[in-house]
Image (tube, grey):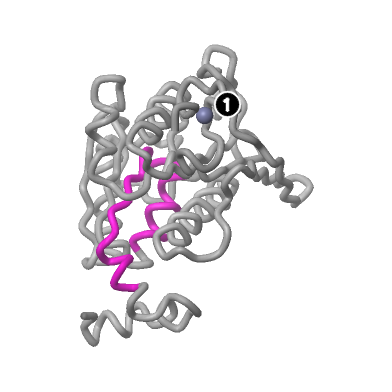
Amino acid sequence: MLTETQLKRYTRNILLPNVGAAGQEKLLQSRVLVVGSGGLGSPAAYYLAAAGVGHIGLVDSDKVDLSNLQRQILHRTEDIGRPKVASGAEKLRALNSDTEVIAVEKLITGENADDVVRSYDVIVDCTDNFSVRYLLNDACISQQKPMIFGGVLSFSGQLMTIMPGEGPCLRCLFREDPSPDASSCAEVGILGAVPGVIGALQSTEVIKYLLGLGNLLMGRLLTYDALTAAFFEVTLERDPSCPSCAQL
Ligand SMILES: [Zn+2]
């Protein structure tokens, strides 16, 4: 049962069709893992905490750097040098004490990916590291958990919702981790509000999944181009020989 304070805090959620108090209670009982507390993870986690997701895991092994502050809005100037998960967890707790924030200061590896993912309902891929992204993809496929992929570079960003066994996964698109050839934001730059757009869309997909609302971005790779102010999407199919998800 929601308290008086919760009814007031979440009233704009509760008013929404097909959400109501029952939907809000569901959000408060949900467990969402946000991997990466940077440009994408900041807005994604912030909106999830604001919405009253009850348990948010924040994973990152980095410390806050001055050059992060141009876009990573969970962190402030005085946080420089602190672990990103400590800085991020503090902001989320200050926003909403209903949200339990679990700070996980580690790099996802082949050894720990399955354990890190295990206790969550949905995973938000907010990392800028392709090898971590592929490890998460495989862990989510093997445990049949949805993953909301997001990525940004320069003036554009992309996202897609991966539903294991129902829609394509990352390895259906690109068999192998493309990181040896991929450019990074550290090399080519990133307009700070672009991860704001994509991270907000990722959090929207999470809420929709948790509450069973609308149509998920499954099998649809959505791209945002800031320079033309346009969104476009490409429909993708599962690869029947995908090494990660073909057996599902
Ligand atoms: Zn696949």
Quick check: 55 above or below 228? below
> Label 1 is placed on what type of residue?
Pro
Q: Secondary structure at mark 1?
A: loop
Instruction: Report x, y in % for residue 91.
Output: 29, 56
Quadrant of the frame with the C terminus? top left
Q: Nearer the viewer, residue 135 or 62?
A: 135
Q: Residue at x 66, y 37 (%)?
A: 236
Viewer-proximal residue, 99 or 247?
Answer: 247
Crowding at dot 1, Cα within 10 Å, few <14 / some 14-19 / many 20+, comes out as: few
Instruction: Tell me: residue 82, above or below residue 122.
Output: above
**Which stretch is magenta?**
24-49
Residue 47 in magenta stretch: yes
Look at mark 1 in the image and give the residue it sits on: 240
Cβ of disc 1 within 8 Å of ligand 1?
A: no
Q: Residue at x 27, y 66 (%)?
A: 28
Image x and y of residue 117, in percent: 29, 38
Instruction: Identify the residue at the far right of this view.
Output: 228
Q: Quadrant of residue 223?
A: top right
